[in-house]
C-alpha cells in the first residue's frame, strides 16, 4: 500500500529508502504491524516533517550535533 504521508510515532521502528518505479519512497516498519507499508515521501522528508512538528528541522538538528562535537 502506498500512502501519501506518514507521522513518526512511538511504534515507528524504521524508515528505509527504497526505489519504486524510478522514484525513492519510504518503507515504514512499525512495531506490532504484520506488514510494512510505503509512503510517497523520502525518508528525509518524513524525518523533517517530524522535526518540524516539535519546533525544529532536520537541518537544525544537524547544526546542533555539529556544535556539540
Image: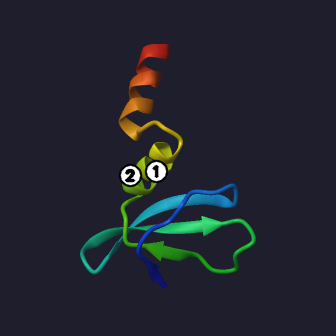
Please report the residue visible at 41 percent of the width from the left and 74 percent of the height from the top.
4
Image: 46 above or below 67: below
User: Do tag 1 and tag 2 residues touch (Cβ < 8 Å)?
Assistant: yes
Image: 46 above or below 26: above
Q: Residue furthest left?
A: 22
Q: Is residue 69 visible?
A: no
Q: Is residue 12 left or right of residue 15?
A: right
In the image shown, does 4 or 24 lie closer to the viewer?
A: 4
Image: 48 above or below 67: below
Residue 66 lies in what quarter of the image?
top left
Residue at mark 1: 47
Q: Is residue 48 left or right of residue 31?
A: left
Residue at mark 2: 44
Q: Position of residue 23 (x, y in %)?
A: 27, 72
Please report the residue visible at 38 percent of the width from the left and 52 percent of the height from the top.
44
Q: Position of residue 43 (x, y in %)?
A: 42, 57
Amino acid at each position: 500500500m502506498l500512502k501519501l504521508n506518514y507521522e513518526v510515532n512511538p511504534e515507528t521502528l524504521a524508515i528505509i529508502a527504497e526505489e519504486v518505479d524510478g522514484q525513492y519512497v519510504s518503507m515504514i516498519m512499525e512495531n506490532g504491524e504484520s506488514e510494512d507499508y510505503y509512503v510517497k515521501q523520502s525518508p528525509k522528508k518524513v524525518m523533517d516533517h517530524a522535526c518540524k512538528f516539535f519546533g525544529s528541522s532536520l537541518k537544525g538538528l544537524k547544526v546542533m550535533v555539529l556544535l556539540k562535537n
